[in-house]
Image (cartoon, rainbow, N blue to C red):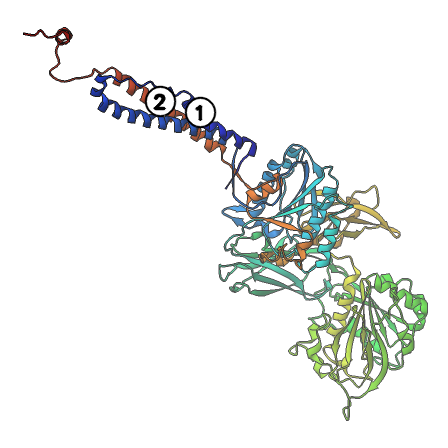
């Protein structure tokens, strides 16, 4: 189908000119009877038919010449797609959003989809007209404004596309479109358009979040934008099949890792390819601080399946470290073959134990068992690492350092912030200021374990409140129960309910004897109806064994069982030591600033006391770009923060040389602090959008509020920007046909003229008996005389 200029189509009337000229030039012949013409009738009839055909042919060629001339001047276009936008007349602002997610690195016909997206973005810029302006947004886990406001210098915008690279992770579509709306708000043109070029990866679209889509639709209208923008989604074709082994996750067996013992490192390897069957990686390498420490093999993984590889490693020195696992495999997406995690290896874990009831003798009170479990005097090989690098030769290195304070002496505690975990062992009650301090401590990231004894003041516990004015424990102490139901003398811990992260180590009956615990006395806990409160385990009587309450950044764990031998045998079982340690690790985890963060989350690091402005702290991102961090005062000290964390990968915060002591003894004394921005492993599974996902016809579709239009081809995309129907101009072909037809007309005219001239030069043969002219005249004169009568 062609689209022509309707005004120029009127020029097709000139096709009639040759016909009109022919009609006007026709002469009305006068018929004169001439007897000699009868000799030429047959010859003239044949010649007239030939001349008529030649004239018709020449007239057709000349009419077609004029028609093709008008056709070429009309600049016709061949429609190749749907009409997404009307004819654009006014200048417009165009925001180009490029999908920078990990899956855009997949290659189709030897070229990555991200490279294709950049190419199509250049075509969009070429489709813009004079007066148009363009902005560019790189969409990854967070939106990066490459050109934050529309620029009319389209060549400068095109140059900004040269250095773009995928951000990795998943594309946050709503965040990217909102950033595009904000960019368009900075432009001065009335017409607004958003062009999103993506590979159609479904993850990151949040199609279930209808309220967020509605909020975006409201933000894209007045007063932010005077007119709603046309949002065009261009989906690039994915590879028909692809092979991929991904390092999906790396986790540690303990929330807090110390240099006192080895930690298990679990690596999950998944096969997220499509149409290529099972993959069999060569191996999985574990690297610590850039040095490969161990390699392990992995069996073939079926398509859609996964496998786990477990390493065991002991970090020799405390301080920040980086652990990375690489899946060595020849696949189509090598960018997701490595998973990285940063961690702080702790030199010590300070724990405050508040003792409610003094011990009558050795190992007679709950605090005694707690302290012995936290820092055993009889150290076995499994609990403690080899001798420390510093200190007394042969002295065992212990991670947890407990401090015991009697409940009446809590006023002597200088600051709870000096401890990562606080444990209350059979504390009857605490002063109001101490309870308030505990609430603030937990909200700031501290951990609190409450193990109430039989004689505690349950009314006082029930009235403890956190900074949010909710019950600090997340439950009420209803009544203290002794024995089991009926004639049972005790209850047991239901091992099959130990799904809390701090108790999972005890759930395996092969290594845990928790099922042998006999509980003679326990508190019945009435759990609050609060989304921040959860039960972590149950007794076989159906009563809660452990209740968790999230308060701010920290957690409060409440045990229903007193930690003494008077009310059960739990403190003397083998599982007691790992139970106490795992609870301490879990509660201490939020106390420190996280090393592994989500995209867009700030990097925050407390600076040593002697580092302060005008000292410069810098951050190197995964692409190698080094940028200054921001220094802010935090209490009596300073902290560095860095917010540009859109790209997934390893970041390093560089402290000034003054931060490094002259004689460092641990890794913590270094000047580089690692952080990792996590990638979404779901991005490695290419789940594509369906036609229904972006259907605007259905009123209940989540994207209906914003009104998306899908461009199936590049011509549809450029036509949506330029305005009008997509297609390509074919006037060049008409011009070539015009030239060929002109040559044909000239050749035909010359051939006909030559033929006619050659015909006129030929003599007319009246027969074989013709004589001379004189003889003919003599005979004719003789016949004309009257005959004499004899």
Q: Residue 779, position in %: x, y?
A: 12, 9
- Residue at which label 1 appears: 20
Residue 176 lies left or right of residue 54; in this view the side is right
Residue 430 is situated, as x and y percent measured from the top left of the image, at 92, 72
Q: Residues within 10 Å of mark 1 (few under 14, many from 20)?
A: few
The residue that appears at 72% across and 78% down in the rendered structure is: 574
- Above or below, comparing residue 628 to residue 208 in the picture: above
Residue pictured at 84% horizontal, 63% vertical:
443
Comparing labels 1 and 2, the label whose residue is closer to the camera: 1
**Who is closer to the viewer here, 19 or 91?**
19
The structure residue drawn at horizontal position 61% and vertical position 42%, both measured from the top left corner, is 720
Q: Which residue is mark 2?
A: 749
Q: Quadrant of residue 392?
A: bottom right
Position of 219 with respect to 707 (left or right) is right
Foreground pick, 234 / 340: 234
**Mark sitting earlier along the chain (1/2):** 1
**Quadrant of residue 542 in the image?**
bottom right
Q: CA distance from mark 1 to mark 2?
A: 19 Å
* Label 1 element class: helix
| Disc sitting over residue 457 in the figure | none
Is residue 147 among the parts visible in the rendering?
no
Of residue 231 and residue 103, the one placed in the foreground of this image is: 231
Q: Is residue 631 visible?
A: yes
Whole-percent x, y for residue 22 in the image: 41, 23
Residue 539 as seen in the image, left or right of residue 162: right
Please determine whether, in this image, residue 523 is positioned above or below residue 412: below
Residue 68: give x, y in percent of width and height: 46, 30
Judging depth in this view, the residue of 789 and 574 nearest the camera is 789
* Disc 2 element: helix
Residue, far left: 790
Give the number of marks: 2
Q: Quadrant of residue 295?
A: bottom right
């Amino acid at each position: 189908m062609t689209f022509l200029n309707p005004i120029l189509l009127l020029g097709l009337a000139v096709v009639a000119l040759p016909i009109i000229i022919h009609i006007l030039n026709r002469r009305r012949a006068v018929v004169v009877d001439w007897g000699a013409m009868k000799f030429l009738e047959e010859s003239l009839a044949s010649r007239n038919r030939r001349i008529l055909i030649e004239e018709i042919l020449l007239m057709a060629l000349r009419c077609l010449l004029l028609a093709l001339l008008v056709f070429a001047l009309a600049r016709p276009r061949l429609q190749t797609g749907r009409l997404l936008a009307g004819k654009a007349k006014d200048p417009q602002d165009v925001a180009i959003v490029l999908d920078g997610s990990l899956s855009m690195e997949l290659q189709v016909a030897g070229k990555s989809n991200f490279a294709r997206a950049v190419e199509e973005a250049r075509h969009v810029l070429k489709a813009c007209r004079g007066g148009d302006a363009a902005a560019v947004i790189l969409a990854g886990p967070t939106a990066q404004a490459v050109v934050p406001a529309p620029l009319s210098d389209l060549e400068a915008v095109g140059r900004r596309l040269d250095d773009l690279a995928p951000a990795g992770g998943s594309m946050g579509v709503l965040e990217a479109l909102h950033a595009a709306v904000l960019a368009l708000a900075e432009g001065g043109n009335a017409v607004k358009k958003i062009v999103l070029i993506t590979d159609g990866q479904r993850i990151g679209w949040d199609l279930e979040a209808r309220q967020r889509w509605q909020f975006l639709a409201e933000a894209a209208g007045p007063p932010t934008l005077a007119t709603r923008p046309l949002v065009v989604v261009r989906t690039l074709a994915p590879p028909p099949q692809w092979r991929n082994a991904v390092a999906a996750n790396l986790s540690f067996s303990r929330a807090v890792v110390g240099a006192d013992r080895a930690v298990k490192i679990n690596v999950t390897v998944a096969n997220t390819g499509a149409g290529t069957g099972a993959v069999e990686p060569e191996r999985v390498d574990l690297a610590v601080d850039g040095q490969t420490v161990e390699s392990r093999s992995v069996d073939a993984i079926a398509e859609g399946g996964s496998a786990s590889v477990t390493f065991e490693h002991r970090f020799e020195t405390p301080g920040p470290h980086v652990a990375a696992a690489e899946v060595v495999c020849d696949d189509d997406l090598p960018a997701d073959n490595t998973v990285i995690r940063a961690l702080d290896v702790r030199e010590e874990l300070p724990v405050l134990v508040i003792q409610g009831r003094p011990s009558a003798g050795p190992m007679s009170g709950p605090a005694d068992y707690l302290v012995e479990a936290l820092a055993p005097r009889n150290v076995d090989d499994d609990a403690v690492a080899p001798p420390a690098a510093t200190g007394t030769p042969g002295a065992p290195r212990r991670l947890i350092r407990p401090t015991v304070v009697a409940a009446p002496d809590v006023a002597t505690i200088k600051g709870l912030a000096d401890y990562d975990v606080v444990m209350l062992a059979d504390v009857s009650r605490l002063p109001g200021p101490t309870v308030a301090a505990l609430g603030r401590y937990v909200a700031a990231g501290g951990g609190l374990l409450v193990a109430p004894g039989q004689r505690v003041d349950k009314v006082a516990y029930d009235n403890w409140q956190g900074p949010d004015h909710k019950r600090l424990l997340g439950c009420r102490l209803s009544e203290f129960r002794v024995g089991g139901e009926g004639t049972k003398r005790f209850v047991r811990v239901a091992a099959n309910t130990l799904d809390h992260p701090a108790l999972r180590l005890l759930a395996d009956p092969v290594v845990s004897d928790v099922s042998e615990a006999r509980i003679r006395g326990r508190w019945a806990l009435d759990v609050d109806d609060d989304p921040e409160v959860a039960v972590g385990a149950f007794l076989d009587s159906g009563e809660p064994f452990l209740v968790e309450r999230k308060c701010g950044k920290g957690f409060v764990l409440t045990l229903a069982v007193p930690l003494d031998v008077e009310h059960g045998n739990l403190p003397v079982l083998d599982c007691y030591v790992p139970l106490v340690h795992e609870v301490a690790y879990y509660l201490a985890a939020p106390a420190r600033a996280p090393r592994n963060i989500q995209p867009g989350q700030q990097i925050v690091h407390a600076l040593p006391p002697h580092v302060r402005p005008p000292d410069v702290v810098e951050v190197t991102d995964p692409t190698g770009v080094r940028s200054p961090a921001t220094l802010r005062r935090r209490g009596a000290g300073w902290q560095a923060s860095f917010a540009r964390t859109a790209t997934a990968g390893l970041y390093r915060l560089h402290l000034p040389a003054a931060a490094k002591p002259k004689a460092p003894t641990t890794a913590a004394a270094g000047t580089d602090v690692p952080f990792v921005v996590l990638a979404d492993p779901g991005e490695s599974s290419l789940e594509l959008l369906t036609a229904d996902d972006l259907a605007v016809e259905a009123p209940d579709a989540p994207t209906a509020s914003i009104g998306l239009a899908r461009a199936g081809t590049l011509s549809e995309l450029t036509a949506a920007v330029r305005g009008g129907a997509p297609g390509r101009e074919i006037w060049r072909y008409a011009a070539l046909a015009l030239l060929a037809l002109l040559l044909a007309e000239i050749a035909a005219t010359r051939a006909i003229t030559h033929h006619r001239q050659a015909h006129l030069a030929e003599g007319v043969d009246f027969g074989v008996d013709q004589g001379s002219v004189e003889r003919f005249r003599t005979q004719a004169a003789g016949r004309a005389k009257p005959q004499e009568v004899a």
